[in-house]
Amino acid sequence: MRCLALFLLLAPFASVVGQTDPDTKTTLRSARELLLSRDFDKAQNLCTQVLKADPKNIEALALRAQTFVGARKPLDAVADFTRLIELEPMNANAVDARGGEYFKAGKIAESVADFDRFLAVRPVEANGHWRRGISLYYAGKFEAGRDQFRGYEKVDTNDVENAVWHFLCNARLIGVEKARGEVLKIGKDGRVPMMEVYALFQGKARPEDVLAAATAGNPPAARRDVQLFYAHLYLGLHAEVTGDAKKTREHLTEAAKLRIAHYMGDVAVVHLGLLPKP
């Protein structure tokens, strides 16, 4: 999925900041700059400093929650988003962000509930909310998940990942072979090795074709690792849906090692954690 950054730095979590003294404004400005430079610990410390003096400071809560998102501390992020929502019950962005953090913490039902709560307020964003579709898949709500990914076609018809997640939901409902006949049609996904992944789920390519595409042309290490992450993630998902538990664990373990700074990196880690113990 291509349209979500690591975390929503510019999202207006704080709908009303209110009056803030100059020193606090300076501290929070420094915290935001540190957050943007990905110095999460220092940003978090500055926000905590403000919150000790003013526990209801909306901007400090929102910023600190985002430092926890960036630092991959989902339960800490959930706690701050929850406090933020208590202070501003109609803060839809905070509800949506908490849903993502619940998912990363493996709390799938809570994730779905938050995403549904968000869309009740922002129905215009329903089609594009692919994160909800992923949570629905892990919640075992395959029909609703299938519908979510079909809706995403109205947003992007060139996203192999959307077609794959639609297939995964559909395969749980009607079986792998029938689902292959209902794979969503896409145009051209320029990301490597997505077209090979698409062919794999259609039954037109082999796992080795996906891995070969991910490393073809001797790409720079950083790009190769991203491409291999996606290759192993979707090879693991393909192995699972086709009944190969050994390959499922092998590929998802590799994907988790290559975990990228994107929501899908967390999906790999969550999925690996949900697998039965060997």
Image (cartoon, grey):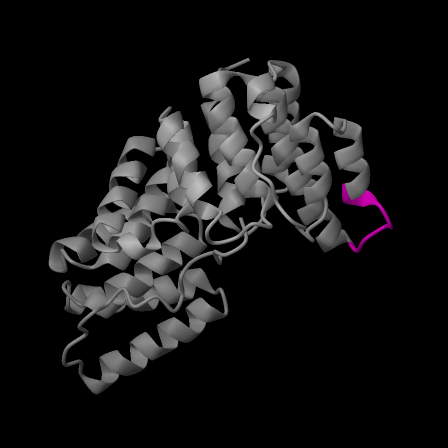
Decide whether residue 258 is among the magenta residues: no
Image quadrant containing the C terminus? top right
Can residue 162 be seen here? The reply is yes
Question: Quick check: 189 left or right of 120?
Answer: right
- The residue positioned 34% from the left and 54% from the top of the image is 125
Instruction: Give how far across and how far down residue 7 sits, in percent.
Output: 43, 58
245 sits left or right of 221 in the view: left
Segment colored magenta: 214-220
Residue at 35%, 62% (x, y): give it.
44
Q: Is residue 21 above or below residue 278?
A: below
Q: Provide residue 144's location: percent of width, then percent of height.
A: 35, 32
Q: In the rendering, at what x and y percent does residue 234 appear?
A: 62, 33
Q: Give the vertical position of 57 relative to 65 (above or below).
A: below
Q: Position of residue 69 (x, y in %)?
A: 40, 53
Name the residue rendered at 53%, 16% in the picture. 175
Would you say the magenta stretch is mainly helix, strand or loop? loop
